[in-house]
């Protein structure tokens, strides 16, 4: 119980990262509380942790405060990156970074280690049903998902460093893709053992998760497991049983012949991969519902986002959700909508309720609806399922 006797208050506990840190800290013996602005899907994964929702964060006396990047400046405290670096230093660690697939790849590594009796710990940015959540503790390897969006992954010094791929996604942090590539190269140079996902050929293993992108994720995971001295045949047998992460091509429900899938994809490459996979699931119409996140990404990549969404037959776009950056005059979800190719049915839905109503009006038996984005598309997906005829 390395954190026994500690009292920790997480500001932004409803996010993908801090919810995992909170569960992990509690399992390692700390008393944990937290604060979040509103209800999020990750609050459902917290294990009996007291959470203040709304208002301002109010850390109890005697509690150490850990602050999410999204809430920097709200209250005095350590950054989440500094706290994660402390955890990584306590164990033999595998850290996974990259533009796409890092959550799934890290989850695959943790799942295989657990299935093979290696008793790992893990902290990933998504809920993994087979692992019982987004964090867990054991006495073996610590598997962690790192974050390059604010360069905080550089603080993590693992034994095995993994980068899935390199693509510019955080324009406010990096001026170019070459700058991002150099950043990752420098981080990899500091690690004893390294995996570069783009050097791994997609696996031929029959996976439970669909899509070419997941065959690449599995290849990267297997390479890392090899460096951790896991026998390849054993790892391949175990990884075939991995069924995925919540909000990664997650079937939310099916009613009236309409299937509703929710996915965390939020940049052009991820959206395109998700929609190509969804296309294989229907011979009728594919309807995409996208909620943009981060104003600078929306400004920089509106054309590319529109092109990716154009892989669907119809696309609904909401306004930009509150992200980690301030609003930019003239930057709304309409920039993405206006970039859709001719022939794609388009719908402007500023709010989540608008998106739900439009998707329900368009969907017909045999169609597949895919909700996409970082923020709250999962709410849209659930509302669509509830609104479909039985």
Image (tube, rainbow, N blue to C red):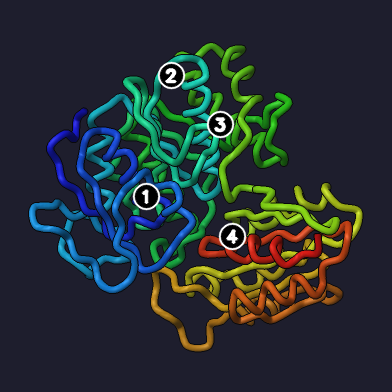
59 vs 105, nearest the viewer: 59
**What's the CA distance linking mark 4 and mark 2?**
35 Å
187 vs 384, nearest the viewer: 384
Within 10 Å of disc 3 (Cα), the crowding (few <14, some 14-19, many 20+) is many
187 vs 108, nearest the viewer: 108
**What's the CA distance linking mark 2 and mark 1?**
27 Å
Asked which secondary structure carries label 4, the reply is: helix
The x and y percentages for residue 79 are 23, 55
**What's the CA distance linking mark 3 and mark 1?**
25 Å
Judge from the rendering whether residue 23 lies leftward or rightward of residue 365; answer left or right: left
**What's the CA distance linking mark 4 and mark 3?**
28 Å
Which residue in the structure is indicated by mark 3? 220
Which numbered tag is attached to residue 19?
1
Within 10 Å of disc 1 (Cα), the crowding (few <14, some 14-19, many 20+) is many
Asked which secondary structure carries label 1, the reply is: helix
Which residue in the structure is indicated by mark 4? 378
**What's the CA distance linking mark 2 and mark 3?**
13 Å
Of discs 3 and 1, which sits in the foreground? 1
Which residue in the structure is indicated by mark 2? 228
Which of disc 1 and disc 3 is earlier in sequence? Answer: 1
Within 10 Å of disc 4 (Cα), the crowding (few <14, some 14-19, many 20+) is many
Most extreme residue toward the left is: 62
Within 10 Å of disc 2 (Cα), the crowding (few <14, some 14-19, many 20+) is some
Specify whether residue 183 is in view: no
Q: Do labels 2 and 3 touch, CB within 8 Å?
A: no
Q: Is residue 389 above or below residue 243?
A: below
Asked which secondary structure carries label 3, the reply is: helix
Q: Do labels 4 and 1 touch, CB within 8 Å?
A: no
The x and y percentages for residue 289 are 68, 67
Which of disc 2 and disc 4 is earlier in sequence? Answer: 2
Of discs 2 and 1, which sits in the foreground? 1
Q: Do labels 4 and 3 touch, CB within 8 Å?
A: no
């Amino acid at each position: 119980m390395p954190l026994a006797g500690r009292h920790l208050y997480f500001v932004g506990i409803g996010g993908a990262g801090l919810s995992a840190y909170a569960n992990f800290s509690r399992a390692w013996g700390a008393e944990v509380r937290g604060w979040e602005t509103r209800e999020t899907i990750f609050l459902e994964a917290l294990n009996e942790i007291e959470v203040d929702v709304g208002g301002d964060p109010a850390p109890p006396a005697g509690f150490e405060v850990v602050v999410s990047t999204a809430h920097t400046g709200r209250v005095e405290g350590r950054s989440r990156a500094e706290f994660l670096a402390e955890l990584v230093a306590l164990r033999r660690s595998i850290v996974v970074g990259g533009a796409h697939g890092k959550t799934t790849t890290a989850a695959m590594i943790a799942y295989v280690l657990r299935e093979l009796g290696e008793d790992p710990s893990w902290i990933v940015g998504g809920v993994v049903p087979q692992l019982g959540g987004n964090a867990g503790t054991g006495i073996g390897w610590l598997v962690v998902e790192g974050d390059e969006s604010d360069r905080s992954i550089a603080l993590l010094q693992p034994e095995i460093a993994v980068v899935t791929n390199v693509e510019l996604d955080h324009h406010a942090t990096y001026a170019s893709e070459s700058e991002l590539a150099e950043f990752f190269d420098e981080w990899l140079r500091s690690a004893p053992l390294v995996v570069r996902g783009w050097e791994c050929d997609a696996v031929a293993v029959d996976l439970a998760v669909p899509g070419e992108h997941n065959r690449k994720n599995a290849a990267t995971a297997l390479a890392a497991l090899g460096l951790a001295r896991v026998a390849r045949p054993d790892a391949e047998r175990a990884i075939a049983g991995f069924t995925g992460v919540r909000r990664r091509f997650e079937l939310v429900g099916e009613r009236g012949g309409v299937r509703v899938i929710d996915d965390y994809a939020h940049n052009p490459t991820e959206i395109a991969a998700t929609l190509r996979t969804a296309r294989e699931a229907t011979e009728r119409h594919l309807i995409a519902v996208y909620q943009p996140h981060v104003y600078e990404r929306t400004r920089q990549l509106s054309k590319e986002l529109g092109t990716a969404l154009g892989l669907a037959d119809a696309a609904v776009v909401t306004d930009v959700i509150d992200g980690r950056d301030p609003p930019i005059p003239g930057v709304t979800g309409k920039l993405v909508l206006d970039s859709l190719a001719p022939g794609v049915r388009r719908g402007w839905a500023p709010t989540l309720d608008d998106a739900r109503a439009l998707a329900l009006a368009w969907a017909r038996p045999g169609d597949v609806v895919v909700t996409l984005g970082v923020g709250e598309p999962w709410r849209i997906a659930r509302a669509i399922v509830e609104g479909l005829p039985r």
